[in-house]
Amino acid sequence: MGRQLDEQIAGRFPVGQRLRVLDVGMGRGAQALRLARAGHRVTGLEEDSGSIAVARAALSGEPEGIRERMRIIEGDGRDTGVHFLPGSFDVVLCHGVLMHVDEPDPLLAGLARMLAPGGLLSLLVRNGDAPAMRPGLSGDWDTALASFDTTARADGPGPVVRADRLAALTATLAGIGAPLHAWYGVRVFTDTVPDDALLPADPERLLAAEERAGRTDPYRSVAALLHLCGVRG
């Protein structure tokens, strides 16, 4: 996903431009810190105190220049209008958040308002068009059959989370003034791999296969996650 995001940034902004980035629901700060290391000014918004502690600990070990480029704010992603002025950011990330929000449209509209004209909105969502893939490939036939009639899905042994269909999100993005520019699949081949599985001897080959599948039909359509990139008009 990081490679996909870098591709979109490189295609929209001049090389070397220091971008203003907002990461809504930044979690432990992996993407936020990666972009700060690349020279961008990053604001991370997160409501989970445990994740914030991990992100701040990671940031504290970085050189001073990177620490100065990144700030972390404790808060709910639905309250962006409280913390920031409209048009304050060139790039807004919202990765792995919509699946936990019952009514995503107000959140998405708020994120679009944070973008400057020509700004990039990056969303990572559960794929509501293929919820039966994981249980089906795992041989869980009862769950697979039930999944054809719902967009909700279990994230492994964890709670059931909401998923989004590509067509519905495409319409939503158009309606909020940040129409879909590009989309990818994420975790096409590896969604059923256990979290504690060992990396292969050559992980670059795995990444190359996932990256190719994530931009190629029909493979990307059945990925566990979708990475959607909208552009503010």
Image (spheres, grey):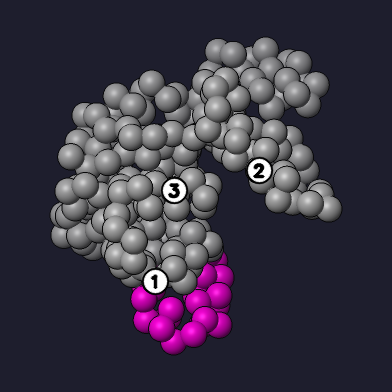
Give me the C-alpha separation between circle 1 and circle 2: 26 Å
Label 3 sits on residue: 7
Label 2 sits on residue: 208
- Residue at (45%, 53%) from the top-left corner? 6
Q: How many marks?
A: 3
Give me the C-alpha separation between circle 3 and circle 2: 15 Å
Looking at numbered disc 3 in the image, what kind of residue is underneath it? Glu
**232 on left or right of 95:** left
Q: Is residue 61 magenta?
A: yes
Q: Residues within 10 Å of mark 1 (few under 14, many from 20)?
A: some
In x, y percent, where is residue 104?
A: 35, 36
Q: Depth check: 7 or 199 in front?
A: 7
Looking at numbered disc 2 in the image, what kind of residue is underneath it? Ala
N-terminal label among 3 and 2: 3
**Which of the labelled discs sits on residue 50, or is there none?**
none
- Residue at (37%, 40%) from the top-left corner? 229
- Residue at (36%, 76%) from the top-left corner? 69
Looking at numbered disc 1 in the image, what kind of residue is underneath it? Gly
**Which of the labelled discs sits on residue 39, or is there none?**
1
